[in-house]
Amino acid sequence: MTDFDRTVELKLRGMTCGKCVEHVSEELQALAAVDNVAVVLNTEGISTVTAYINTPVDDADLREAIDEAGDYEIVSIERDY
């Protein structure tokens, strides 16, 4: 781990299967700031995606990654910093 060890939690609507989890995880992990991603899939509601980051990351970068992953709605973005 680096000196900056934080998380960003995204609430997403529209994730329905394991492939959705795979696509979202891959796109977020492609960001330089993201070390790892954990997803709690809720196929009938809002899924929770936690990105473990090593440097601050902008909302615009997160939104772009989610847009690239598929047709998901970002309900919220919360940080622990």
Image (spheres, helix red, strand yellow):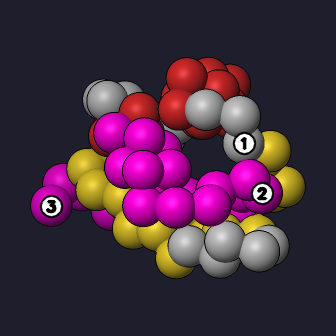
Residue name at image x 65 percent, y 26 percent = 67
* Residue 77 on the magenta segment: no
Residue 44 pos. (x, y %): 77, 74
Counting from the top left corner in percent of width and height, residue 75 is at: 84, 55
In the drawing, what numbered circle is on residue 1?
3
Q: Quadrant of residue 1?
A: bottom left
Mark 3: which amino acid?
A: Met
Mark closer to the chain start, 1 or 2: 2
Q: Do the CB atoms of the residues marked 1 and 2 lie less than 8 Å apart?
A: yes
Say what secondary structure mark 2 lies in: strand
Q: Nearer the viewer, mark 3 or mark 1?
A: 1
Closest to the observer, 69 or 11: 69
Say which residue label 1 marks: 72
Q: Amino acid at mark 2?
A: Arg
State the residue position of label 2. 13
- Identify the magenta region: 1-26
* Relative to 24, 38 lies left or right: left
10 lies above or below 58: below
Give the residue type at disc 1: Tyr
Screen quadrant of the C terminus: bottom right
Horizontal side of 74 relative to 56 (left or right) equals right
Q: Residue at x 55, y 23 (%)?
A: 68
Q: Which residue is pictured at 42% across the width and 61% down the height?
A: 18
